[in-house]
Amino acid sequence: MITVTGLHKSYRDKVVLAGIDLRIAEGTIFALLGPNGAGKTTTVQILSTLIGADGGEARILGRDVAREPDAVRALIGVTGQFSAVDNLLTGQENLNLMADLHHLDKPTRRRRTAELLQRFDLTREAGKPVSTYSGGLRRRLDLAMTLVGDPRVIFLDEPTTGLDPRSRRGMWDVIRDLAAAGITIFLTTQYLEEADQLADHIALLDHGRLVAQGTPDELKRRVPGGHVRLQFADADEFQFASQALDAPVRDEAALAIQVPHDGSVRSLRALLDQLDHASVEAVSLSVHQPDLDDVFLALTGQPDRERTTVR
């Protein structure tokens, strides 16, 4: 659905994108992550025809972004970091305005807006001024307006910034439903958990270069720190297990050990076989894998001031 080859962008002597390559399949959720100034928003702006690139090529459904911008715009929708809704209009009027901008005839406009109001659970609020909407409602309306033109690709630039946890999870459900309907989602987010929950494929951008790509699980396996924690009923079992498994981390107070683990079922089965062979039984077992925070820090070297968010 989206192909990017050697994309370059500079502002004077500052290189923002240094030749990135992307391949994004149809109907998938793709997340672009990176610290402040990495080039995420610039990438979205280029792909959505808002600014031009200095070099390279980008295509959406075979259409060249630079040479066929009108054709590309007919295929895409864009939801930016801030809701592009008119506070003086009602939700229905905002959707009608967008339908007029898309030159829909009246029957099509009525049908399309009614479908979107129902789809985004906005029917009850449709006649109220948007100034009375909560942040979650405004975001849902904003996304509904993006869908008026029936896009094949939607660019979501930090779509849940400022939302409370309940509204954020509601937006996640909406995004999943869009992808299930065959729409390709290009997502940038400051919430690593969001990318982990939603994305089929993730690319990590740092100083204008792609430093890693893969599924969330593939990226997590690239950094060390995965382990199994085993806890035992008494000190003798704890000591036997520590020796049998040559555990590098031991918590004598909790009678627990930690053993490095790659997250695979095969290695977990081998670990349990070792315990069984040593006639040692654990009372509890938990598997711990690195999360995207660990991946982000390991591959970008950025300080993690807020632990759960990046821009």
Image (tube, grey):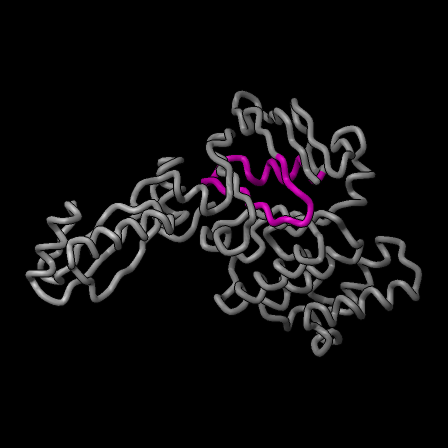
| 260 relative position to 234: left or right | right
Extent of the magenta region: 23-48
Q: Position of residue 10 (x, y in %)?
A: 58, 25
The residue drawn where x is 25% and y is 53% is 273
Residue located at (47% from left, 35% from top): 212
**Which sits in the foreground, 161 or 2?**
2
The image position of residue 219, as x and y in percent, is 44, 41
Residue, far left: 236
Q: Please report the residue visible at 55 percent of the width from the left and 39 percent of the height from the top.
A: 40
Q: Is residue 56 above or below residue 185?
A: above
Residue 263 belongs to the span the image colors magenta: no
Which picture quadrant has residue 223?
A: top left
Query: What is the count of numbered marks?
Result: 0
Residue farthest bottom in this picture: 124
Q: Residue at left 71%, top 47%?
A: 153
In-image side of 236 versus 181 (left or right) = left
Q: Position of residue 279 (x, y in %)?
A: 15, 58
Figure quadrant of the N terminus: top right
Residue 183 position in % (x across, y down): 70, 52
**Which residue, as the protein is rendered here, is positioned at the far front?**
277
Asked whether 28 falls inside the magenta stretch, the response is: yes
Of residues 8 and 86, which is closer to you in this image? 8
Viewer-side residue, 43 vs 225: 225
Looking at the image, residue 299 sits to the left or right of residue 82; the answer is left
Q: Nearer the viewer, residue 251 or 98?
A: 251
**Depicted 48 relative to depicted 157: above or below:** above
